[in-house]
Image (tube, rainbow, N blue to C red):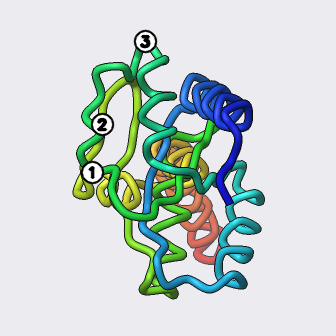
Amino acid sequence: MAITKDKKNELVAELAELFASAKTAVTAKYTGLSVQDMQELRKVARENGIVIKVVKNRLVRVALSQNDYYKDADTALLTDQLLYAFSNEDEVAPAQVLAKFAKTHADLKLVSGFSDGNTLDTAAVTQLANLPTKDQLRGQFVGVLSAPLSQFMAVANGTQRGFAQVLAQKAEQG
């Protein structure tokens, strides 16, 4: 069933807003996924603050052309049936969630992405998916910051321990 021109205009406006507010948008082919698989993907995406949209590529091109950042974006990879994953919180979350889902659902394939006015090819999106999450990076950062202090405390405690052992040996001898 064809959608009305008003509905198309609403979709284009919604997509333009999603692209404007998103830190990253990632596209993936979903041909072959069941309705149940799509519902599962949407649930996982929602839990991670990601919006999933399935719209015609032509409407996405129109929305991109209305956005100052993306009006010159390369849309050559926008072919076949694609889903669009948007995140305005985390730059790598859409790629990571889709890549993780694709590991258990072979029919889902990463295609492209959009970030900071640039078009990302499949290789770039795959690299983005392999980056650590913000929480993992925070943990690594805290570990790097605390390592010198931990090592200093170990050395300081070692000196005290050695001094206590010397005193204990002197007490036993004398």
Q: Are marks 3 and 2 in contact (CB under 8 Å)?
A: no
Q: Could you tell me residue 84's position as x and y percent?
A: 53, 51
> Residue 54 location in percent, x, y?
59, 56
Number of the label disc, if any, that sits on residue 158 = none
Q: Are marks 2 and 1 in contact (CB under 8 Å)?
A: yes
Q: Where residue 77 sits: x, y (%)?
A: 27, 51
Sequence-wise, the earlier of marks 2 and 1 is 1
- Mark toward the start of the polypeptide (3 vs 2): 3
Quarter occupied by residue 108: bottom left
Q: Which residue is mark 3?
A: 68
Which of the marked residues, 1 or 3, is nearer the chain's N terminus? 3
Q: Nearer the viewer, residue 96 or 108?
A: 108
Q: Which residue is mark 2?
A: 119
Bin the neighbour count of mark 1 within 10 Å (Cα to Cα): few under 14, some 14-19, many 20 and up: some
Question: Which residue is under mark 1?
Answer: 77
Q: Nearer the viewer, mark 2 or mark 1?
A: 1
As shown in the figure, which amino acid type bears the numbered disc 2? Thr
Relative placement, left or right, of 124 versus 89 is left
Give me the residue at 30% from left, 36% from top. Answer: 119
Identity, as a three-letter code, of the amino acid under mark 3: Asp
Secondary element under disc 3, as helix, strand or loop, is loop
Quarter location, residue 86? top right
Mark 3 to mark 2: distance in Å? 14 Å
Q: CA distance from mark 1 to mark 3?
A: 20 Å
Q: Position of residue 153 (x, y in %)?
A: 55, 48
Tell me the amino acid under the disc marked 1.
Leu
Helix, strand or loop at label 1? It is loop
Q: Residue at x 62, y 61 (%)?
A: 164
Can the viewer see residue 153 in this picture?
no
